[in-house]
Image (cartoon, rainbow, N blue to C red):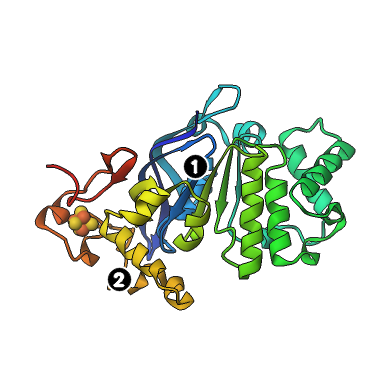
Amino acid sequence: MEHLNISNLSAYYRQLIVNKEFLVKAVDKVSLNLMEGEVLGVVGESGCGKSTLARAVMMNIIPPLEYIGGRITLTTRGGNVLELNKLTRNDLKKMVWGKHVAIVPQDAMSALMPTLKIKRIAYDIVRSHDDSVDYSTALEALRNRLTSLGLSERVADMYPFELSGGMGQRTVIAMATLLSPEVLIVDEPTSALDVLSQKIVLKTLMDLMKRKYVDSMMFISHDIATVRQVASRIAVMYAGKIVEVAPTEEILQNPLHPYTKGLMESIASLEPEVRMRGIKYIPGQPPSLINPPSGCRFADRCSYAMDICRREEPALVEVSPDHSVACWLHIRR
Ligand code: SF4
Ligand code: MG
């Protein structure tokens, strides 16, 4: 069953620079899908549009971000199809967010109200989707969820600042998925954590899937070494575009896009510093998303670039079963 289908999604930032308006094409005609039971990893260096993609998929569009076009359909467990891009913000809040698709944003922990206990924050989250739920029902649901994810139910009585980084992140994950949404989007869930906490958070995410508290997950990270541990499929994002998608093993062993190849070489290094820099050791920089080049957006950094690469944009094409790539080297003309 396909839980999420994203088709030609574009979301741009409107920016005013010295009284002139510019559009930053952060998410540009992105198509992806998410199947029941899968973890889709979305990788790419910072600034490539990953976090914007997360917001756009939720249709959580706040200026200066603008929805430009595209379709996002979510199929519920009951088989209802919701077209998110057609719903008002109010409907999304009441009917969709938290219930069918939830997000754990980057730095979620630091965004929590420091003066409220976890149980109160969780109650507010539940109430925002269903105002008939009483406090004791919500509290019981929270305690059950915490313990089934290996956290102490005492966490409910704590303030956000009393939780360590890893425990805080797991608590945020538990709260975001309290209503068991079909789809969970996590944005850099382990980036700020030490290695041990990272492992525990990854395990919590896998437990969510195993226990069917969520049915499918989009795991966004700049760190492909982390993504490969949890993702069944990986999508590589570059300068607002998806440039390659394939099952994890396939993309690790047979990367086709020159950018993906660069990413793979960076994880081959065991030195954490090289891994942190990731793709940066490929000479050059991503293009400005204000006026991206008309052809392939990787052309300026690509050692295989041909004439056509600067003239025409390569579409994302399935070149073998389940393996798609947007590169003129692999597309028959
Ligand atoms: Fe390189 Fe051309 Fe492929 Fe772009 S389309 S990655 S420039 S070979
Ligand atoms: Mg980000």
Please name whichever residue, 318 or 104, is drawn nearer the observer in this view of the structure: 318
Q: Mark number for residue 247? A: none
- What residue sits 31% from the left and 69% below the top? 285
- What residue sits 61% from the left and 56% below the top? 202
Q: Mark number for residue 57? A: 1
Counting from the top left corner in percent of width and height, residue 318 is at: 28, 39
**Residue tagged 2:** 282
Q: Above or below — where is 333 with respect to 239?
A: above
Q: Which numbered disc flags the more N-terminal residue, 1 or 2?
A: 1
Examine the rendering and report whether any part of residue 168 can be seen: yes
Counting from the top left corner in percent of width and height, residue 218 is at: 52, 46
**Residue projecting furthest to the left:** 307
- What residue sits 54% from the left and 31% below the top? 87
Quarter of the image with the C terminus is top left
Q: Is residue 9 left or right of residue 255?
A: right
Q: Badge 1, how many Cα within 10 Å: few under 14, some, many 20+?
A: many
Q: Above or below — where is 278 with respect to 52?
A: below
Counting from the top left corner in percent of width and height, residue 126 is at: 75, 39
Q: Is residue 185 left or right of residue 321?
A: right
